[in-house]
Amino acid sequence: MHQGAIKQTTNLEAALKREPCDHLSLINDSNSKWSILRKQANRIYHYRLTQHNLSQEDKEALMLARNEIMCLANSLEAVTTIQKALIEE
């Protein structure tokens, strides 16, 4: 039913394709790595709130996906911060 829309909402590759090219300097700008993940997590949350015909199961799956993406973004930011601190020492 909504699986295609949910898959597109949770697909990080699709999110990367939606972003303008000048915002995708993933190799040179580590900030954009977790920024894109957080944007995608926010899109998932917005989709969950605006789609009133989702089943409870779908809503729970979307929240799990959002939470996993946010955890990944936070972990990536923490690792980058540690790397920068080690380089500066």
Image (cartoon, grey):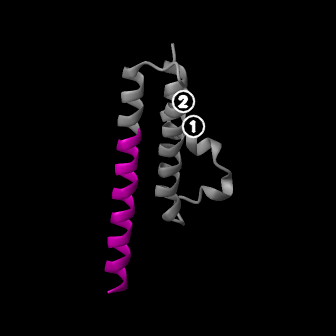
In screen coordinates, is 56 left or right of 2? left
Q: Which amino acid does label 1 sit on?
A: Ala
Q: Nearer the viewer, mark 1 or mark 2?
A: 2
Q: Position of residue 7 (x, y in %)?
A: 49, 27
What residue do we see at 51% from left, 45% from top?
Answer: 42
- 81 vs 30, left or right, is left
The total of numbered circles placed on residues is 2
Q: Which residue is drawn at 57% across and 37% down?
A: 14
Which of the pair 36/86 is nearer the observer?
36
Q: What distance separates the C-alpha of mark 1 from that of mark 2?
A: 7 Å
Quarter-of-image position of residue 28: bottom right
Mark 1 Cα within 10 Å, few/some/many (few <14, many 20+)? few
- Identify the secondary structure beneath mark 2: helix
In x, y percent, where is residue 89?
32, 87
Q: Is residue 17 above or below residue 54?
A: below
Q: Residue at x 56, y 41 (%)?
A: 15
Relative vertical location of residue 7 with respect to residue 27 in this rendering, above or below? above
Is residue 4 within the magenta segment?
no
What is the secondary structure assignment of the residue under circle 1? helix
Q: Mark 1 points at which residue?
A: 14
Image point (31%, 79%), residue name: 86
Residue 75: horizontal and vertical position, in percent?
A: 33, 57
Magenta stretch, overall SS:
helix
Range covered by the magenta-colored residues: 66-89
Residues at circles 1 and 2 in contact by the CB criterion of under 8 Å? yes
Residue nearest the viewer, comparing 87 with 57: 57
- For badge 2, the amino acid type reads Gln
Q: Name the residue under label 2.
A: 8
N-terminal-most mark, 1 or 2: 2
Q: Could you say which disc has been placed on residue 33 in the image?
A: none
